[in-house]
């Protein structure tokens, strides 16, 4: 069994699409729009086959992130090496994204950094 996709609501559909296609090499589907429901979405597909659905509707509100709230808190993107973790972290910092956790080796042996995407979702960048 595998997780087919994960979905998130956003108030910044195009920004989120651009973030994942630019920095994590996702491929975006064509934009889906249902005018009756005022629903718009993209499926973002990563090299591994994993997919992220980003969805927007007018009534969705932006809430500031809380690292200790219930529910989905982060996802991890493997970039293949410590050097790539460091390089991507620095590129994201240079491009104005908030680095939540600097590159480091965690207690459970992962080398990772953590960045907030345009909606404040936490993305672990791992080897």
Image (cartoon, rainbow, N blue to C red):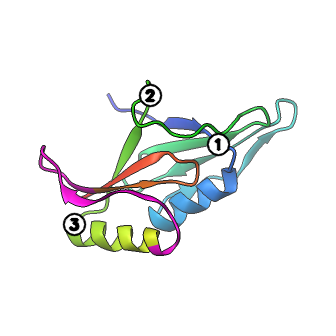
Q: Please say if the residues under marks 2 and 1 sit with CB atoms less than 8 Å apart.
A: no
* Disc 2: which residue: 69
Quadrant location of the N terminus?
Answer: top left
Residue at point 68%, 50% (across, down): 12
Quadrant location of the C terminus?
Answer: bottom left
Q: Position of residue 105 (x, y in %)?
A: 16, 56
Q: Please say if the residues under marks 2 and 3 sit with CB atoms less than 8 Å apart.
A: no
Q: Looking at the picture, tell me which residue is in the foreground, 16 or 100.
A: 100
Residue at point 44%, 34% (across, down): 4
Mark 3 and mark 1 lie on one chain; the one further toward the N terminus is: 1
Q: Looking at the picture, tell me which residue is in the foreground, 46 or 72.
A: 72
Q: Secondary structure at mark 2?
A: loop
Which residue lies most toward the top here? Answer: 70
* Callout in the foreground (3, 1): 1
Q: Is residue 12 above or below residue 59?
A: below
Left/right placement of residue 21 relative to residue 72 reads right
Q: Secondary structure at mark 3?
A: loop
Distance, label 2 to label 1, CA atoms, is 18 Å
Mark 3: give few (<14), some (14-19) or many (20+) Cα within 10 Å: few
Distance, label 2 to label 3, CA atoms, is 30 Å
Q: Position of residue 6 (x, y in %)?
A: 48, 36
Mark 2: give few (<14), some (14-19) or many (20+) Cα within 10 Å: few
Residue at point 38%, 73% (across, down): 90
Q: Looking at the picture, tell me which residue is in the foreground, 125 or 50.
A: 125
In the rendered image, residue 110 lying in the magenta stretch gets the answer yes
* Disc 3: which residue: 81
In the rendered image, residue 55 lying in the magenta stretch gets the answer no
Q: Which residues are magenta?
A: 94-112
Q: Is residue 18 above or below residue 51?
A: below
Q: Is residue 19 above or below residue 94?
A: above
Disc number at residue 10? 1
């Amino acid at each position: 069994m595998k997780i087919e996709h994960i979905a998130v609501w956003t108030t910044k559909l195009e920004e989120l699409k651009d973030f994942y296609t630019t920095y994590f090499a996702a491929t975006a589907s064509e934009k889906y729009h249902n005018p009756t429901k005022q629903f718009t979405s993209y499926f973002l597909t990563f090299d591994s086959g994993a997919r992220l659905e980003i969805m927007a509707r007018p009534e969705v509100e932006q809430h500031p992130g809380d690292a200790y709230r219930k529910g989905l808190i982060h996802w991890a993107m493997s970039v293949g090496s410590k050097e790539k973790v460091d390089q991507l972290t620095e590129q994201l910092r240079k491009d104005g994204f908030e680095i939540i956790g600097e590159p480091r080796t965690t207690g459970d042996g992962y080398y990772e950094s953590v960045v907030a995407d345009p909606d404040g979702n936490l993305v672990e960048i791992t080897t």
